[in-house]
Amino acid sequence: NAGVMQNPRHLVRRRGQEARLRCSPMKGHSHVYWYRQLPEEGLKFMVYLQKENIIDESGMPKERFSAEFPKEGPSILRIQQVVRGDSAAYFCASSPTAGGLSEQYFGPGTRLTVT
Amino acid sequence: GESVGLHLPTLSVQEGDNSIINCAYSNSASDYFIWYKQESGKGPQFIIDIRSNMDKRQGQRVTVLLNKTVKHLSLQIAATQPGDSAVYFCAESTGRRALTFGSGTRLQVQP
């Protein structure tokens, strides 16, 4: 049973470019969460999605960031016009049930570097 | 907003000793708590969880204690091994919301 998969593992973008991060949840999981982690800090919640629905985006910056989880295919976190402050590790997690009522399984993360 | 925090940023123990990592949380409405282990360059790995209707839960070599009176959570690791060296995060949630993570404690196991 494959775990949560994320790609790419490392992504380098120049300022102003777009970054697309992909997350495939564990088989049978329909709840996906995105978190951001700066070096030596804890993970910060960004967005919680179910298939085709955004449930909670209270942690998402209002501009340049968007997320989707289509009926088919992986969840996508999209960052437009990246800036140096977007450099971080972005982790995706999935769970079989809603919200925080069950353990969330994390992927290996995508490390975004903005030059 | 309310947050979860940790008392000690770094904990150094001898191999074979028991480790205790502490966490204070501020949201009295939190009803679910998890401890994660994160090794360098990897995603968080689930260790153990506990619900607010419990005060203790044991796993293999690990025990989580929850004291709701003082809003304190701890992770005990028995017979700590070099492979336990990592950063440990506590996390909490309320109802169906996503997890709120603490800032982490680095555990260093000395051989």
Image (tube, coloured by chain):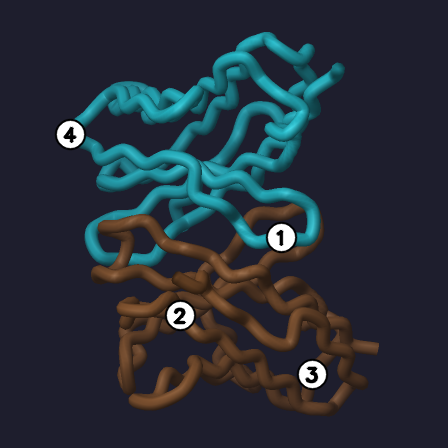
Chain B rendered in what hue? cyan
Q: Mark 3 sits on what residue?
A: A82
Q: Mark 4 sits on what residue?
A: B53
User: Which sits in the foreground, B85 or A54?
Assistant: B85
User: Counting other residues with Cα less than 10 Å from the Cα at mark 2, is it few (<14), some (14-19), or many (20 or more)?
Assistant: many
Amino acid type of disc 3? Val
User: Counting other residues with Cα less than 10 Å from the Cα at mark 1, is it few (<14), some (14-19), or many (20 or more)?
Assistant: some
The location of residue B86, given as percent across then percent down, is: 63, 35
Q: Chain of mark 2?
A: A
Q: Mark 2 sits on what residue?
A: A25
Q: Secondary structure at mark 4?
A: loop
Q: Mark 1 sits on what residue?
A: B42
Q: Are marks 3 and 2 in contact (CB under 8 Å)?
A: no
Q: Quadrant of residue B33?
A: top left
Do dots 3 and 2 share one subunit? yes
Disc nearer the start of the sequence (3/2): 2
Rendered-image quadrant of the C terminus of chain B: top right
User: Counting other residues with Cα less than 10 Å from the Cα at mark 3, is it few (<14), some (14-19), or many (20 or more)?
Assistant: many
Name, please, the residue furthest toward the left. Answer: B53
Q: CA distance from mark 1 to mark 3?
A: 23 Å
Q: CA distance from mark 1 to mark 2?
A: 16 Å
Side of B62 where A65 appears, left or right: right
Q: Chain of mark 1?
A: B
Which chain is depicted brown? A
Please tell me whether residue B13 is drawn above or below residue A16 in the rendered image.
above
Side of B109 where B7 appears, left or right: left
Amino acid type of disc 2? Pro
The location of residue B45, given as percent across then percent down, is: 49, 45
